Image (cartoon, helix red, strand yellow):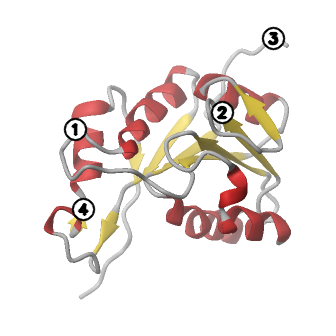
Amino acid sequence: MDFKSLEMLPVISCSLHSMLAPAIAIIKYYMPYSRITYIMTDGASLPISMSNSIRDLKNKKLIDNTITYGHAFGGDFEAINIYTALIGAKEVCNADVIIVGMGPGIVGTGTKYGFTGLEQGTIVDAINTLGGYSIAIPRISFADKRKRHYGLSHHSITTFTKITKTKTTIVFPDIKD
C-alpha cells in the first residue's frame, strides 16, 4: 500500500464516548450517504462490545466499520496505534468521515492532567500529521454539578491549551438562553 496522506479527509475527535451518536446524527443529516468509520482508542473501556452505542449505531447502519487499536479490541479491524488506525480507516474502509474516541468508561482523578481524555490532544496531532482535517468535539455540560465540568470542562481546556500542539477546528453548540 502506498499511503500518501489523509488528504484533508474529515476526522472528528470526541472528548467523550457519549458524543459519538450526536456527531454521527449530524454527519448523516448533512451527508446521508457518507461512509463512517469509528476508531475506538484504548483510553477507556477496552472491548468495543462494552459499548451499547456502537452496537446500536452498527445495527442501524450508521457506522460502516469500526477499528480498535492499542489495548482496545473487538473492532471490525485491529490496528497497532492511532496512525495505523487512521490509515486503515482511509485505505481499507474507504471512509468519507472518521470519528475517533475512547470507549465508555473514562477514567479521571479530578486533577489537571489525571484523565484519559488527554489523549484527544495527541489524536488531533496525529490527524494533522497524516494530513487530515481535524475537528474536535469538546466536553461541555450545563447539567454536571461539579464546577470543573460545568460549561466548557477543564478537560477540554487542558487538552486544547496544554496538550495539543497543532491546530484543530473546535465545534461548539449554538446555545441560546
**Cα–Cα span, label 1 and label 4:** 13 Å
The residue labelled by disc 1 is 161
Q: Secondary structure at mark 4?
A: strand
Residue 125 place in picture, x, y as percent: 44, 27
Picture quarter with the C terminus = bottom left
**Cα–Cα span, label 3 and label 1:** 34 Å
> Outermost residue toward the bottom?
177
* Amino acid type, mark 4: Leu
**Cα–Cα span, label 2 and label 1:** 26 Å
The residue labelled by disc 4 is 152
Of 11 and 88, nearer the camera is: 88
* Amino acid type, mark 1: Thr
Nearest to N terminus: mark 3 or mark 2: 3
For discs 3 and 1, the disc positioned in front in the rendered view: 1
Residue 73 place in picture, x, y as percent: 71, 40
The reply to whether discs 2 and 1 touch (Cβ–Cβ < 8 Å) is: no
Position of 82 relative to 118 (above/below): above
**Cα–Cα span, label 3 and label 4:** 41 Å
Picture quarter with the N terminus = top right
Query: Position of 139 compared to 61: left or right?
Result: left
- Which mark identifies residue 24? none
Query: Position of 125 compared to 175: left or right?
Result: right
Nearest to N terminus: mark 2 or mark 4: 2
> What residue is drawn where x is 77% and y is 58%?
63
The residue labelled by disc 3 is 2
The residue labelled by disc 2 is 69
Q: Secondary structure at mark 1?
A: helix
Query: Position of 49 compared to 148: left or right?
Result: right
The reply to whether discs 1 and 4 touch (Cβ–Cβ < 8 Å) is: no
